[in-house]
Image: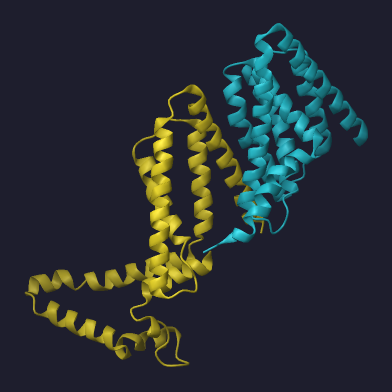
Chain colours: A cyan, B yellow
C-alpha cells in the first residue's frame, strides 16, 4: 500500500504553484477565461471542460518526449492571439474558438508535461497544476462577467490588450 | 503496488500463515508445492474429509462433484496470479480517467456501465490498499478500515452529485470530471515512460 503522506504536502502545492510561475501561462489562461466570458454560452461551459483534457494530451506528448517544435513560441503567440481576441471582442463560431484554444492548450500542456519533476507524487502534482490552470480560467471568467456593463466591456477589452502586449514581450525575449 | 498485490495473493493463499510458503527448507517450486498438502496437517485433513464425503455420495453426484475440485483449484491459481500480477494503481488511474471523461461528457450511459465501473473501482481500491508487512489479523483490520472509509466517501460524493440541480453545479461537476481525467492521463503517461 502506498502511503505517500510525506510527499503529498510537497507535491500538491508544487503542482498548484507551477502554472503560476510562468507569466506567459498565466496570461494565456486568463485570456481563455476572459474570451469564454465574452463568447458566452455554450463557450463558457465548453472551454473549461475541454481545455484540461486537450492540455493533458499536450502533456502526454511532452512526457513521452515526442518532438513539438516551437513550444515556447507557441505559448507566447497564444497570449498574443487570445489577448487580441478579447481586445477585439471577437466572436467567431464556437468550433473555430474551440480549435484555436485547443491548439494553444497543446503547447501549454506540452510545456507542463515536459517539466514534470522526477520523484514527485505524480497524481498530486498533476492534480495541482490542472486545478491551478482551471482556477486561472475561472478567474478570467469571473472578471469577464463584467462585460454585461459598458464600462465592463471596456475593462475586459483593455485587459485583453494588456495580455496581447505581454505576449509580444514574451515573444520578443525568445526571438 | 506490486508488493501490496503480492501480499494480497499471500493472504488469499495462506491457510496457516506460519507455513504458507515452503514446508521443507530449500525445497520450493513445483516439488515444494507438491509436498505442501501432504505435509501441512490442516491441508491433508481437509482433503481427507472432503474426499471421504464426496465418495460417500451416489455415483451420479460423485460424477458431478469430481470436476468441481480441479476447476476450483485452477480458478484459485488464476485469482492469486491475477492479484499478484495486477498493477492495481494503473487500474485505479485508468478508472479515474474513464470516470472523469464520462463525467465531463455527461452522456446518458447504459445501466451496465456505471455498474461495472462501481465494481471495478471497489476491487481496485481494496487491491491497492493491502498493507505489505502486517499480520493477517492486522491486514484484515486495515482492509476493514479502508472499506468503511471508502464507503463513507462514496456515499458522500454520490449524495453531493445527486443534489446538484443548479446549472453552475452541473457544469462544475463536469469540470471536476475533466480535471480528474486530465490528471489521470498525465500520470498514466508518466508511468508508461518510466
Name the residue rendered at 48%, 35% in the picture: B103
Asked whether, in this view, residue B82 is left or right of residue A24, the answer is: left
| Side (left or right) of A23 relative to A134 | right
Q: Is residue A97 visible?
A: no
Q: Residue at x 28, y 69 (%)?
A: B72
Given residues B141 and A33, the one toward you in this image is: B141
Looking at the picture, how far across and down is residue B129, in whole percent? 47, 61
Question: Residue B29: x and y, percent?
Answer: 45, 84
Residue sitting farthest toward the bottom:
B25
User: Position of B82 compared to A3: left or right?
Assistant: left
Left of A35 or right of it: where is B171? Answer: left
Q: Quadrant of residue A97 in the image?
A: top right
Residue B4: percent from the left, percent from the top?
A: 49, 67
Residue A6, image x and y in percent?
A: 63, 60
* Quadrant (top left/top right/bottom left/bottom right) for the C terminus of chain A: top right
Residue in the picture at 68% in, 56% down: A120
- Front residue of this view, candidates A168 and B34: A168
Can you name the residue that lies furthest to the top here?
A150
Above-or-below relation of A3 to B50: above
| Rendered image quadrant of residue B193 | bottom right
Amino acid at each position: 500500500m502506498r502511503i505517500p503522506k510525506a510527499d503529498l504536502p510537497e507535491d500538491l502545492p508544487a503542482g498548484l504553484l507551477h502554472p503560476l510561475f510562468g507569466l506567459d501561462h498565466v496570461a494565456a489562461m486568463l485570456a481563455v477565461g476572459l474570451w469564454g466570458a465574452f463568447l458566452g454560452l455554450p463557450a463558457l461551459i465548453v472551454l473549461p471542460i475541454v481545455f484540461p483534457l486537450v492540455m493533458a494530451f499536450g502533456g502526454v506528448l511532452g512526457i513521452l518526449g515526442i518532438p513539438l517544435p516551437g513550444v515556447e513560441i507557441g505559448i507566447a503567440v497564444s497570449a498574443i492571439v487570445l489577448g487580441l481576441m478579447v481586445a477585439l471582442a471577437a466572436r467567431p463560431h464556437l468550433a473555430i474558438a474551440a480549435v484555436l484554444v485547443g491548439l494553444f492548450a497543446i503547447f501549454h500542456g506540452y510545456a507542463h508535461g515536459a517539466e514534470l519533476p522526477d520523484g514527485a507524487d505524480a497524481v498530486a502534482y498533476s492534480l495541482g497544476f490542472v486545478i491551478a490552470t482551471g482556477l486561472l480560467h475561472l478567474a478570467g471568467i469571473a472578471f469577464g462577467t463584467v462585460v454585461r456593463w459598458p464600462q465592463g466591456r471596456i475593462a475586459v477589452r483593455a485587459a485583453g490588450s494588456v495580455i496581447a502586449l505581454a505576449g509580444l514581450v514574451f515573444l520578443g525575449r525568445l526571438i | 503496488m506490486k508488493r501490496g498485490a503480492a501480499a494480497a495473493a499471500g493472504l488469499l493463499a495462506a491457510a496457516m500463515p506460519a507455513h504458507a510458503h515452503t514446508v521443507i527448507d530449500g525445497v520450493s517450486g513445483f516439488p515444494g508445492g507438491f509436498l505442501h498438502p501432504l505435509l501441512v496437517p490442516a491441508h491433508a485433513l481437509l482433503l481427507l474429509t472432503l474426499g471421504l464425503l464426496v465418495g460417500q455420495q451416489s455415483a451420479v453426484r460423485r460424477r458431478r462433484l469430481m470436476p468441481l475440485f480441479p476447476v476450483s483449484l485452477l480458478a484459485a491459481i488464476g485469482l492469486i496470479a491475477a492479484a499478484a500480477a495486477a498493477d492495481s494503481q494503473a487500474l485505479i488511474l485508468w478508472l479515474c480517467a474513464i470516470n472523469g471523461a464520462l463525467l465531463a461528457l455527461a452522456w446518458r450511459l447504459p445501466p451496465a456501465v456505471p455498474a461495472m465501473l462501481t465494481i471495478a473501482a471497489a476491487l481496485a481500491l481494496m487491491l491497492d490498499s493491502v498493507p505489505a508487512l502486517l499480520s493477517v489479523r492486522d491486514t484484515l483490520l486495515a482492509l476493514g478500515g479502508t472499506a468503511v472509509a471508502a464507503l463513507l466517501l462514496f456515499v458522500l460524493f454520490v449524495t453531493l452529485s445527486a443534489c446538484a440541480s443548479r446549472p453552475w453545479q452541473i457544469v462544475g461537476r463536469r469540470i471536476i470530471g475533466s480535471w480528474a481525467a486530465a490528471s489521470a492521463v498525465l500520470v498514466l503517461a508518466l508511468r508508461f515512460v518510466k
